[in-house]
Amino acid sequence: MDIQIADQTGKPIKLPAGEKTALTLAMALHEKGRQALKKKNITLALPLLLEADKEFRQCS
């Protein structure tokens, strides 16, 4: 599955494969962490958000 990442104007952003994978994973983990926070499930949210941060740091 190939996900296309675009800027705010809809223009596709070209990223190296590793960064694209890290960014996609980071965004998914971040969203899962946010959903856990909304449900007041801090013990689930914290590891998800920390892992998302780790993945975001792999992107330049």
Image (cartoon, helix red, strand yellow):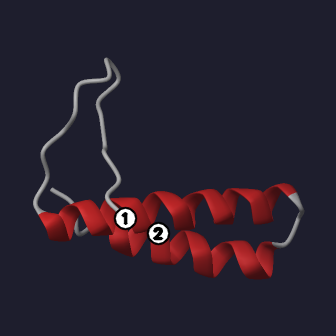
**Image x and y of residue 10, in percent:** 32, 23
For residue 15, side relative to residue 26 (left or right): left
Of the pair 49 and 14, the residue shown nearer to us: 14
Residue 29 higher or lower than 60, as above or below: below
Q: Residue furthest right?
A: 39
- Numbered circle sitting on residue 21: none
- Numbered circle sitting on residue 52: 2
Quick one: label 1 or label 2, which is nearer the N terminus? Answer: 1
**Image x and y of residue 26, in percent:** 43, 64
Quadrant where the C terminus is found in the figure:
bottom left
User: Hey, which quadrant is residue 47 in on the image?
Assistant: bottom right
**Image x and y of residue 16, in percent:** 10, 60
User: Given the image, on which type of amino acid does mark 1 rest?
Assistant: Met
Q: Mark 2 falls on what kind of element? A: helix
What separation in Å lies between label 1 and label 2 (alpha carbons)?
Answer: 20 Å
User: Given the image, on which type of amino acid does mark 2 rest?
Assistant: Ala
Quadrant where the N terminus is found in the figure:
bottom left
Q: Residue furthest front?
A: 1
Q: Residue at x 12, y 45 (%)?
A: 14
Question: Residue at label 1?
Answer: 1
Q: Mark 1 falls on what kind of element? A: loop
